[in-house]
Image: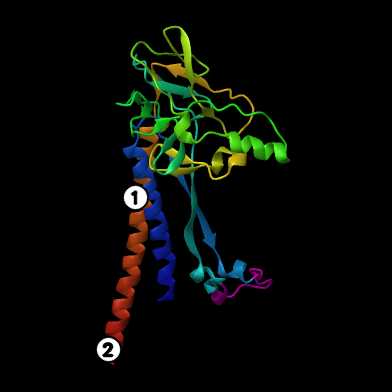
Amino acid sequence: MKELWVPLSGALAQQRKVETIANNVANANTTAFKKDRTVFKEYLSAYEKGTDIDLPNKEWAPEDFYRSYGAEKAHPKVDGSYTNFSQGQIRPTNNPFDIALEGNGFIEVYGPNGLRYTRKGNLYVNQDKELVTDQGMKVLGKLDLPEVGDGPEAIDVVKQIPPPEARTIKLQEGRVTINNQGEIFQKGSLVAKLNIVEFKEISGLRKEGNSLFINQDSRNIKKTETKTIVHQGSLELSNVNPVEEMSNLIKAHRNLESIQRVIKTYDNIANKAYNDIARF
């Protein structure tokens, strides 16, 4: 019953799709959540061997219709997943420490595992007067570096870069104003500027949890001025459409149930074959 591996591999791949969609639905109300999609790939033994699928150029006989062309060895699998970074709707909250990003930028934050990037703008001031996210990660200030080449001057600039701990944003008591460029003002004075980062290839980011992203290549960061607009007193909603996701989830469940019925049919055929053989 080697053919059983075909529907079994399909069931495993479809289960992964169900889990991905279910996670999207669960985070439909998570601030700035970006939905995920799974990508499938099918392997055919005829393609792997590099041979052509031969269709007989003759008068067809009944046995020609039973040629599988290696289809019994075909198996779908999850080829990967990707994140949809489309803009979520912006909702006013009137909380001065809530910020929403309009554009492709991310807030640079620092936590126990290093630098991370997020669009989740639920910010707070901790007991050390530092601006942090709702997960306690420290929000970092803008770092302006001159454009240099690859020579010795580049090494000198790298040595001058302060550690992330030195770029935390500290605030005093009083009203906080954040303009569209991410500049933070208190009592009419510029206190700091949020480090809003844009990337050359946004698909190069790797998701960590439901709201954090990791950039594994520093060359992926744009050096030019960002075009992202910061909205104070607002939050970006999830880009998940609950109705669409529920529809996709129902379809995926039905496909999974169909595949499970096929597997059950194979199992019944095998049991019947074993029982018939045992009678002889």
Label 2 crowd (10 A; few <14 / some 14-19 / many >=20): few
Number of numbered discs on residues: 2
Left or right: residue 167 versus residue 225 is: left
| Image location (x, y in percent) of residue 19 | 36, 49
Q: Is residue 51 magenta?
A: yes
The prevailing secondary structure element of the residues shown in magenta is: loop
Residue of label 1: 253
- Identify residue type, mark 2: Ala
Vertical side of 18 occupied by 94: above or below: above
**In this orientation, which residue lies closer to the viewer: 217 or 143?**
143
- Display coloring: rainbow
**In this orientation, which residue lies closer to the viewer: 214 or 162?**
162
Q: At numbered mark 1, what does the secondary structure look like: helix, strand or loop? A: helix
Left or right: residue 28 versus residue 108 is: left
Vertical side of 149 occupied by 141: above or below: above
Please say whether residue 111 is visible from this viewpoint: yes
Tell me the magenta residue range.
50-64
Please say whether residue 221 is visible from this viewpoint: no
| Image location (x, y in percent) of residue 132 | 37, 28
Q: Is residue 206 magenta?
A: no
Q: Residue at x 70, y 36 (%)?
A: 153
Measured in 3D between alpha carbons, the distance from the residue under mark 2 to the one under mark 1, in whole angstroms, is 37 Å
Q: Residue at x 60, y 68 (%)?
A: 48
Q: Which quadrant of the figure contains the N terminus?
A: bottom left
Rendering quarter of residue 267:
bottom left
